Amino acid sequence: MDLKKKLLWQCRRGLWELDIILKPFVEKYFELMDSENQLLFADLLKLEDVELFDIFVNKLEPNDKRFNDLKDIIIKKHMDSQSVI
């Protein structure tokens, strides 16, 4: 199974809020990332849903500091995709 398909499946989380952030990010931007960041994203998805959610809402600083830049990119891409009426 290729990595993108595997990660798309792993983006199906118990928290709907994570699904709407993670899945579109993989669909639109995964192939644009270098292999190091693709693997880092895979590591990010190993976190528990509650921890991951807390990181995305800036309630919790990731234990692995490598996740900070990736988290910021994911949030920015998500916010950019939201249309404001």
Image (cartoon, helix red, strand yellow):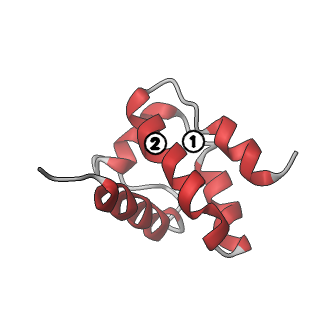
Give x and y (percent) for residue 39.
Answer: 71, 62
Looking at this rendering, what residue extends furthest in the top direction?
Answer: 14
- Disc 2: which residue: 52
Q: Is residue 26 above or below residue 33?
A: above
Up the image or down, 15 lies above or below 77; here it is above
Kind of residue at badge 2? Leu
What kind of residue is marked 1?
A: Leu
Who is closer to the viewer here, 42 or 63?
A: 42
How many C-alpha atoms fall within 10 Å of the one at disc 1: few (<14), some, or many (≥20)? few
Seen as rendered, the residue at the extreme left is 85
- Taking depth in this image into account, of 13 and 44 the one nearest to the observer is 13
In the image, taking residue 80 as reference, residue 42 lies left or right, namely right
Secondary structure of the residue carrying tag 1 is loop
The residue shown at (78%, 53%) is 3
Query: In this figure, which residue is indicated by the disc labeled 1?
Result: 47
Residue 83 x %, y % = 23, 53
Who comes first in sequence, dot 1 or dot 2? Answer: 1
Query: In the image, 31: left or right of 27?
Result: right
**Residue shown at the point (51%, 62%) measured from the top left:** 67
Tag on residue 7? none
In space, the residues marked 1 and 2 are separated at their CA atoms by 6 Å
Marks 1,2: beta carbons within 8 A: yes
Q: Quadrant of residue 81?
A: bottom left
Most distant residue in the front direction: 85
The quadrant the N terminus occupies is: top right
Whole-percent x, y for residue 57 in the image: 29, 47
Secondary structure, mark 2, is helix
Looking at the image, which residue is at 62% across and 72% down? 32
* Residue 11 pos. (x, y %): 58, 39
